[in-house]
Image: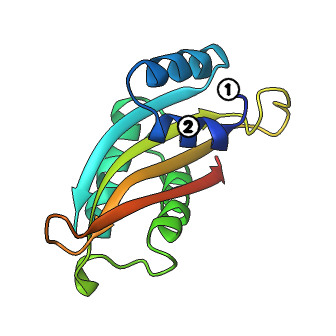
Amino acid sequence: MDCTTIGKTSMILAMASGEDLDRYLKNAEQNKFRICIGQAGSMEFKKIVAAIETAAINEGLISKKYWQKHALYHACIEAFHGICRGELELGTILRTVGLRFVIVRGPRNVRDTGDGEWIAVALYGHMGAPIKGCEHEVVGLGINHI
């Protein structure tokens, strides 16, 4: 599978593991995508967003400039709408998440680079009541123009 679009690339990387992850990561980097992969878990939305933002800044995907942080924040919110089924709440309704996050920066499509830089946030992991064994898989994707 070729990683040529920012959304597909971020989702594949979020769900892949082992040798598959290495292969997809190499393909994405050859396509000039800049990538950061991390993990976060919490009952608080703001802690997950803070982990994603910190990783993006530390890895040089975004600067500390407001407009870049703002683009990332909107990509995070869009991704959270996917995993939270529209309700951006976790602990207040007794649910927690354990997620792998992937941040990808680059063109929307490597074959059409005329519309500037974009940022994608993919989330993949588990959500459920804060009781071991009560979770299920979740996935979300958010893309925003920088």
* 45 shown above or below 52: below
Q: Nearer the viewer, residue 42 or 63?
A: 42
Q: Would you say 98 lies left or right of 75 here?
A: left
Q: Quadrant of the N terminus?
A: top right
Mark 1 / mark 2, whichever is N-terminal: 1
Q: Secondary structure at mark 2?
A: helix
Residue 3: x, y in percent?
A: 66, 28
How far apart in space, not on screen, are marks 1 and 2 (Cα)?
9 Å
The spot of residue 79 in percent (x, y) is 52, 60
* 146 sits left or right of 34 in the view: right
What residue appears at the point 33 percent right and 33 percent down from the top-left corner?
Answer: 58
Q: Is residue 67 above or below residue 25?
A: below
Q: Which mark is residue 47?
A: none
Residue 1 — which label?
1
Dots 1 and 2: beta carbons under 8 Å?
Answer: yes
Name which residue type carries label 2. Answer: Ile
In this rendered view, identify the residue nearer to me: 29 or 126. Answer: 126
Name the mark on residue 12.
Answer: 2
The residue positioned 16% from the left and 72% from the top of the image is 130
Q: Is residue 62 visible?
A: no
Q: Residue furthest bottom?
A: 93
Above or below residue 76? Residue 44 is below
**Could you say which quadrant of the image residue 134 lies in?**
bottom left
At 55% from the left and 23% from the top, the residue drawn is: 24
Q: Nearer the viewer, residue 128 or 120?
A: 128
